[in-house]
Image: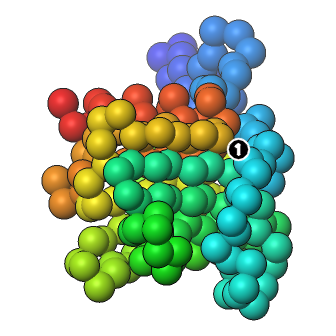
Amino acid sequence: MAGKKRILVLGAAIVLALTGCTNGPSEPPPAESSDRLIPLSEIDPISVADDPLAEHDDSLTGGSPKFLAEVKSGTQRILMYANKTSCGFLTIPHADRPAIGIHLISQWPSEREGNSPYPAGPYNSSSGSDSSRTWASLACSRNAMVIEYTGSLDTDAESRGNVSVTRAADPRAASLIVVGSQEVREMITARVSTESS
């Protein structure tokens, strides 16, 4: 009799191990699905009267860029753009002299590429500086671009388009510029404010 009980208990354990112990149908945990986020390619562009990229070959920008946002602070101007395969940004340090300071471009990561330092990823990234040693990094995904920027931006910097400007969590960068839908910008700035507190 004791032998039959052991076999039944062992059989029940095997069945539970194979089928799992559940309290009903399980649903996967809510995930940050990039399928439900608005991609950069679908964000309304802004108009730029004096396009600083007009004289450049399309191979430099990966095709015809669509300007998504602009930030103006003091004499400097920062423009963010995207096209069908990449995103980029450029700085114009002095509005009265339209020479480009920093110009970074990064392609969107293909499947299984990139990393996820922010929500709405994965991201590819690039970084660089200008002659005045102002440094910037660009993280680019299909849904957002995040720029860490060491140049000083006034607290009352003017912005237009789908952009948010906040303090960066990285102590090397003074500002974090986030371009994307409102939902994406809120997710990213919330994560950054949590990391910096």
Residue found at x 42% / y 34%: 189
Q: Foreground: 160 or 95?
A: 95
Q: Quadrant of the C terminus?
A: top left
Residue found at x 62% / y 29%: 183
Residue furthest front in the image: 96
- The image quadrant that residue 81 belongs to is bottom right
Residue found at x 33% / y 79%: 129
Q: Specify the amino acid type for callout 1.
A: Ser
Question: Quick check: 64 left or right of 115?
Answer: right
Regarding residue 34, the answer to whether it shows in the image is yes
Residue found at x 46% / y 68%: 96
Question: Measured from the top left, where is residue 57 in percent x and y?
Answer: 75, 90
Name the residue carrying label 1.
34
Q: Foreground: 116 or 169?
A: 169
Question: Measured from the top left, where is residue 72 in percent x and y?
Answer: 46, 49
Q: Quadrant of the N terminus?
A: top right
What secondary structure is marked by label 1?
loop
